[in-house]
Image (cartoon, rainbow, N blue to C red):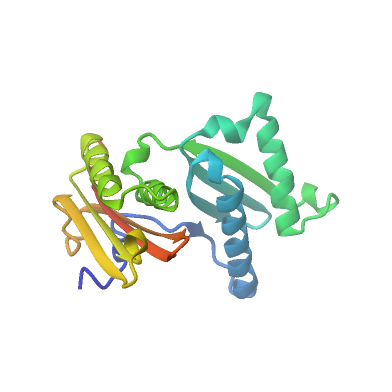
Amino acid sequence: MGQKVNPNLFRLGPVYGWSSRWYDEKHYKETLLEDYKLRNALMKKLMNAGISSVEIERSINSIKVIAYVSRPGMVIGRAGSGLEDLKEFLYKILKISKEERNVKKLDIRVEPIKEPNLDAYLVAKNISDQLIRRLPYRRVMAQTVERVMNSGAKGIRVVLSGRIGGAEIGRVQKLQKGKVPLSTIREHIIFASVPALTKKGYVGVKVWINKPEEK
């Protein structure tokens, strides 16, 4: 069971919270689609700032957007100018006119990621970027595993699948160090999957990290 279920969804509730916190029965479909567009737009725009995830909280007339990034200074900018530009960008995505902004409030918060090497998405994205630059996959996997374990992780598993190294036939390469018990709900295991579009084709990158419990 542990290998067939997304570890993040498996622990939703007991260990992790929801990334979207609201409920609108009448406009559920439209609000869900709006969240999807908002999250995708932010992930693309703040890619260089090392964005990992986006949380959205909604109340009657306000939307709070929390972006978790590894380099918050790039998002905030000088004297908060970057946040103002980002707010204007989100207003366009949400199609909120200047007249409606007094009624519908938008609050943007940027939270720093304390240890990027313990964030599964950032680790997978880093591996993906290195594979696109045609670096040796065995060295990339070994260096990533060592770096994550040195950052305090209990365990890490990295799986590459596809035309690794430009091979004609797709294959799977795995590397694990430490303990990654996928069926144990109380363990803080975070999972991420990021594709690497190489010149020879797609290579799927999957990362499981067993994080230490936060004190």
Q: Is residue 96 left or right of residue 124?
A: right
Q: Which quadrant does the N terminus fall into?
A: bottom left
Residue 73, by quadrant, is top right
- Residue located at (62% from left, 55% from top): 41
Task: Indicate the quadrant containing the C terminus: top left, top right, bottom left or bottom right.
Answer: top left
Image coords of residue 193 (percent x, y): 38, 60
How far from the left and from the top, in percent, is residue 27? 64, 73
Image point (84%, 49%), residue name: 98
Q: Quadrant of residue 81?
A: top right
Can residue 4 be seen?
A: yes
Q: For the point 71% across and 37% down, which residue is it? A: 84
Toward the viewer: 174 or 201? 201
Q: Position of residue 61 (x, y in %)?
A: 68, 55
- Figure check: 201 above or below 54: below
- The single residue placed furthest to the right in the displayed view is 99
Measured along the vertical axis of the image, is residue 30 above or below residue 209? below
Residue depicted at x 82% and y 54%: 97
- In this image, 56 relative to 90: left or right? left
Q: Is residue 74 left or right of residue 164?
A: right
The residue closer to the viewer here, 113 or 25, is 113
> What number of labels is visible?
0
Q: Nearer the viewer, residue 155 or 84?
A: 155
